[in-house]
């Protein structure tokens, strides 16, 4: 199977009411772990690559690796995550990516519309899906006021106008999640009412960024084999399920894969002080990533949707 357009993957998910995982890669082992988990669950998957990942691994390596993965019998899209640099976006559009995120969420509303519209025009001839973001990704807890919420989270009326004016294929609404391993100090409180309203007003596939759960047994592994990430906290799995039931169709996960990789590496090195074969160090990390991905796609409802 060749790489498929992100439009195909997300429109089906939107129609049938489930979500597809967008998993970030930085190297071959992470990619192989993700693909193994999705192959086992017969799930479509979106392989997400940040501008930083492109700088780290190299554009040609990324495209070549993901095209090898695309020989699998599951639908796979290659996605630029948080594209901000127009030169990189152009290179991805012309170089084989099948989904692009333009992240101009730091710009004023009208400028975000203008920049996003440009990318939609550039992507159109290639049938590439375009995702954009509204609002700021900051972790929201249950002690926050309505005023504070309104200042950072997505405005549903603006979302409607934004989708109409830009012609994007999917939208990432800020509803109270944030990137990384330290999302909340207190009790997380995602704004599900806002999410519901955004879905009603836009009807297009919605994307949840900052959706890692900081899985307790993985965190425990990191901390018990020499790591120090005691305060890490993610989005509870029941909140992810709830978000999907309110219209999220793409769930972005990077941190949980990073934590899995590091947990497995720490364990091998702590238990085998004489080990220096990279295959014995990275192999278990790849296995743990595939276990975590298989669990997640089950949770997202995309197993048996390939
Ligand atoms: O949303 C951010 C992703 O986790 C990618 O992070 O820019 O460090 O590669 P990165
Ligand atoms: P996490 O840091 O929660 O994994 O979020 C990743 C993400 O949103 C990538 O775009
Ligand atoms: Zn993100």
Image (cartoon, rainbow, N blue to C red):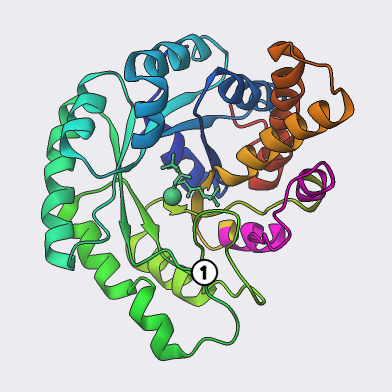
Number of marks in picture: 1
Residue at x 21% of width, y 66% of height: 161
Residue at x 52% of width, y 14% of height: 69
Residue 127 locus on image (x, y percent): 25, 28
Residue 50 can be seen in this image: no
Query: Please, what secondary structure does the residue beneath circle 1 have?
Result: loop
Relative to 183, say whether 302 is above or below: above
Instruction: Name the one closer to the observer, 186 or 162.
Output: 186
Residue at x 63% of width, y 63% of height: 242
> Can you name the residue that lies furthest to the right here?
271
Residue 48 can be seen in this image: yes
Residue at x 52% of width, y 69% of height: 139
Q: Quadrant of ligand 1?
A: top left
Residue 231 locus on image (x, y percent): 69, 63
Q: Which residue is mark 1?
A: 139
> Can you name the residue that lies furthest to the front here?
274
- Label 1 beta carbon within 8 A of ligand 2: no
Q: Which residues are magenta?
A: 219-243
Residue 52 locus on image (x, y percent): 37, 35
Q: Is residue 40 left or right of residue 74?
A: right
Q: How many neighbours does mark 1 have within 10 angstroms: few (below 14), some (14-19), or many (20 or more)?
A: many
Relative to 256, say whether 199 is above or below: below
- As for residue 163 lying within the magenta part, the answer is no
Relative to 303, say whether 106 is above or below: below
Relative to 114, say whether 94 is above or below: above
- As for residue 235 lying within the magenta part, the answer is yes
Quarter of the figure with residue 238: bottom right
Residue 134 locus on image (x, y percent): 31, 62
Placement of the C terminus among the 4 image quadrants: top right
Instruction: Name the one closer to the observer, 181 or 45.
Output: 181
């Amino acid at each position: 199977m060749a790489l498929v357009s992100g439009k195909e993957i997300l429109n089906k998910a939107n129609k049938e009411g489930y979500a597809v995982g967008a998993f970030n890669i930085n190297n071959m082992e992470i990619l192989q772990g993700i693909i193994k988990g999705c192959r086992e669950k017969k799930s479509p998957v979106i392989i997400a690559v940040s501008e930083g990942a492109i700088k780290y691994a190299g554009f040609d390596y990324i495209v070549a690796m993901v095209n090898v993965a695309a020989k699998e019998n599951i639908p796979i899209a290659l996605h630029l995550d948080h594209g901000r640099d127009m030169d990189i976006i152009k290179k991805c559009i012309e170089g084989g990516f099948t989904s692009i995120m333009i992240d101009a969420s730091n710009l004023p509303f009208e400028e975000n519309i203008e920049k996003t519209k440009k990318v939609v025009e550039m992507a159109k001839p290639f049938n590439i899906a375009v995702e954009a973001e509204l609002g700021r990704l900051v972790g929201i807890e249950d002690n926050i006021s309505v005023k504070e919420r309104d200042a950072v989270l997505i405005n549903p009326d603006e979302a409607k106008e934004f989708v109409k004016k830009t012609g994007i294929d999917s939208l990432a609404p800020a509803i109270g999640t944030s990137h990384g391993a330290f999302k909340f100090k207190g009790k997380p409180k995602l704004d599900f009412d806002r999410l519901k309203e955004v879905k009603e007003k836009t009807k297009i596939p919605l994307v949840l960024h900052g959706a890692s759960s900081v899985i307790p047994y993985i965190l425990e592994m990191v901390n018990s084999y020499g790591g120090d990430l005691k305060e890490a906290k993610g989005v509870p799995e029941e909140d992810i399920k709830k978000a999907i039931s309110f219209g999220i169709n793409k769930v972005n996960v990077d941190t949980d894969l990073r934590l899995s990789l590091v947990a497995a590496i720490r364990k091998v090195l702590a238990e085998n002080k004489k080990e220096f074969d990279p295959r014995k160090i990275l192999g278990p990390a790849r296995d743990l990533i595939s276990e975590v991905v298989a669990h997640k796609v089950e949770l997202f409802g995309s197993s048996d949707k390939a």
